[in-house]
Image (cartoon, rainbow, N blue to C red):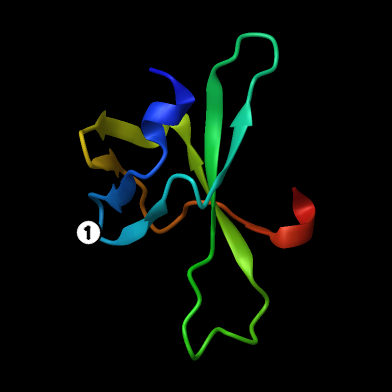
Amino acid sequence: MKLNELVGKEMINIYDGMRMGTVGESDMLIDHETGKIISIILPNRGNAFTFWADRQKLVIPWEAVKKIGREVIVVDLDHTHMRLKNNSI
């Protein structure tokens, strides 16, 4: 699958049904030797309560991707998934 085929797809977590974000609003960590995706990094979707909070990024390991459909990407992440501060990437 080509990277441009992922752009625009909504990411859904089957663990809790949460909409996580859209590929295209994200960054990807790619192995420069193999060209394979290591992880997808989504910005934290803030709301009125977290607007001023320390914003973090959600790191989704490629192994957590369970299914890529025509409109969505289904991932399986529990509550222990990794978050990184903006300046750590």
* Quadrant into which the N terminus falls: top left
2 to 47, vertically: above or below? above
Q: Is residue 11 left or right of residue 52?
A: left
Please tell me in which quadrant of the rendered image residue 2 appears: top left
Q: Disc 1 marks which residue?
A: 17
Q: Is residue 9 left or right of residue 38?
A: left
- Residue at position x 33%, y 48% in the image: 11
- Residue at position x 64%, y 71% in the image: 55
Mark 1 secondary-structure assignment? loop
- Residue at position x 25%, y 60% in the image: 16
- Residue 60, position in %: x, y? 48, 43
Q: Crowdedness of circle 1 by 10 Å Cα count: few (<14), some, many (20+)?
A: few
- Residue at position x 38%, y 57% in the image: 20
72 to 25, vertically: above or below? above
- Residue 57, position in %: x, y? 59, 58
Q: Residue furthest top?
A: 34
Q: Is residue 66 left or right of residue 28?
A: left
